[in-house]
Amino acid sequence: MLVSAKEMLTKAKAGKYAVGQFNINNLEWTKSILSTAQELQSPVILGVSEGAGKYMCGYKTIVGMVNGMLEELKITVPVALHLDHGSFEGAKACINAGFSSIMFDGSHYPIEENIAKTTELVNACNILGLSLEAEVGSIGGEEDGVIGAGECADPDECKAVADLGVTMLAAGIGNIHGKYPDNWAGLSFETLDAIQAKTGDMPLVLHGGTGIPADMIKKAISLGVAKINVNTECQLAFQEATRKYIEAGKDLEGKGFDPRKLLAPGAEAIKATVKEKMELFGSVGKA
Ligand code: 13P
């Protein structure tokens, strides 16, 4: 059964580790992530962007697929199905479709509007027992066509949004989606420290988990980060494994590639990436 992310993140913040959010794009990715979480006895969050939602034939299809897998794969670790960077409309659609966790990204609105919309969703999520992630200070880079310049969040605005009763808070601290440029200044631990001082027990979320050096990840966790999002790294691993398979030309026997075989190396590569991240984030054995 899908669960809200509240309990797993409260435990992670108290225990000084982080739960990974891994974005899903199809059946193979979902299966790889769930089976790795089960094998490592780690809680896990499946992230779904609005673009991935459309690609996978809508939110109801995804809820059906994930619920089916939880049963068929006999998954017993806590799993949350989470909308990633949701719009206000997308958040409502996922609540109706049966997601167990929602991110409303109102970071591009003026703070008053972000607060008003987040408040409405806090109420809806509380009634249904869903977890809600809010965002303050946009995360840089490109995420599913949405381009953010990347900024450090204002700690007072973070406190104002945290006090609305959200479950977790994503705050920009110089992190960006996708690969980090060579001249990246690194995470702003000063900002993170100030945000944690104002928001207390609130689990903080680090987006753009791909390519952040291990020592920075560990320091971010020590300063209150309890959820870390990873997407690009799984895509790169999938791409590399699939490329090698195609180059080897194994199934070119006049019949074309067998999709089950073609996607298998990528699925294995995702498992390896997820395992590495769960070990780094410290969530192994915490289910
Ligand atoms: P990366 O693609 O940089 O791993 O970021 C993922 C993310 O933050 C999803 O919200």
Image (cartoon, rainbow, N blue to C red):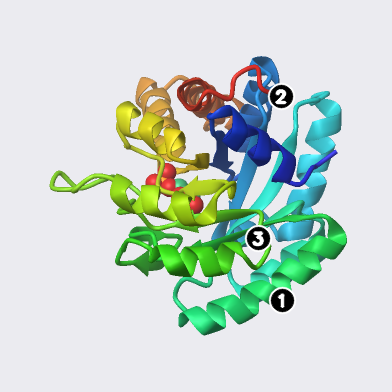
Q: CA distance from mark 1 to mark 3?
A: 11 Å
Amino acid marked by disc 3: Val
Amino acid type at circle 2 is: Ala
Query: So how many labels did they put on this image?
Result: 3
Dot 1 crowding, Cα within 10 Å, few <14, some 14–19, many 20+ = few
Instruction: Identify the residue position indicated by label 3 in the image.
Output: 166
Residue that numbered label 2 is attached to: 287
Q: Nearer the viewer, residue 64 or 273?
A: 273
> On the image, which quarter does residue 246 sit in?
top left
Q: Is residue 246 above or below residue 51?
A: above
Instruction: Decide if residue 27 is in sight here.
Output: no
Work out which quarter of the rendered image holds the C terminus and state it. top right
Of 52 and 188, nearer the camera is 188
How many angstroms separate mark 1 from mark 2 (CA)? Answer: 31 Å
Q: Which residue is rendered at x = 62% and y = 28% of the image? A: 32
Q: Is residue 120 above or below residue 233?
A: below
